[in-house]
Amino acid sequence: MNIDHTHDARALSWVATANDPATDFPLQNLPFCRFRRTGTLEPFRVGVGIGDQILDLTGWDITDMNALMGRPGGERLALRHRLFDTLKAGAPEIDLLPQADAEYTLPCRIGDYTDFYTGIHHARAVGRLFRPDNPLLPNYQWVPIGYHGRSSSIVVSGTPLRRPSGQVKP
């Protein structure tokens, strides 16, 4: 991805909370989400976080994150530019939903994924479970250690997760 004007740290938004130095969602970081208003049974829809607000993308003909991720890179970049232009200082203000008034679900359908050990401390800790005398194999530095992940373990933050047991004897 090329760095362009949408990454300019000096750019400001008309959404005041997006200009707070402590925010996770300034104009330069526009994360997608699937949300609905808390306490309703309305369908979840796609939105973008900005400051402490959400821009609902229903009117933008964006209803499915998997379809959006499958669009060509040029289309996704054009969408980023349009979002930036809509939310930058000086653009007409539009209705947003406070994040505090929303509940979230997984943004997309996750099929499978592969995870890799990238931290030596994690690799050593896991290695100790299976090989206490030799937790870090000599090839760790040269051969990436990957494993198939369970997509069912990907959940919305705060969701209780039942951990499996039985990988090693107690």
Image: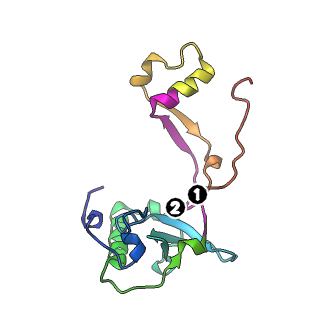
In which quadrant will I find the C terminus? top right
State which tag comes first along the sequence, 2 or 1.
2
- Which residue shows up at 56% across the image and 23% down it? 127
- Which residue shows up at 36% across the image and 64% down it? 21
Place residue 75 in its image quadrant. Answer: bottom left
User: Is the Cβ of the residue at disc 2 closer than 8 Å to that at disc 1?
Assistant: yes
Place residue 89 in its image quadrant. Answer: bottom left
Assign a secondary structure to mark 2: helix
Q: Is residue 118 left or right of residue 63?
A: left
Place residue 16 in its image quadrant. Answer: bottom left
Query: Magenta stretch?
Result: 103-123
Q: Position of residue 51 (x, y in %)?
A: 44, 70
Q: Is residue 169 above or below residue 53?
A: above
Q: What amino acid is found at the position of numbered circle 1 in the picture? A: Arg
- Which residue shows up at 46% across the image and 65% down it? 68
Q: Can residue 45 be spotted in the picture?
A: no
Which residue is denoted by mark 2 in the rendering?
66
- Which residue shows up at 61% across the image and 57% down it? 156
- Give neighbour class at mark 1: few <14, some 14-19, many 20+ (Cα, 10 Å): few
Q: Is residue 166 above or below residue 149?
A: above
Which residue is denoted by mark 1 in the rendering?
109
Assign a secondary structure to mark 1: loop
Q: What amino acid is found at the position of numbered circle 2 in the picture? A: Asn
Q: Label 2 to label 1, Cα distance in Å?
A: 7 Å
Q: Can residue 66 be spotted in the picture?
A: yes
Q: Position of residue 53 (x, y in %)?
A: 49, 74
Q: Position of residue 78 (x, y in %)?
A: 33, 70
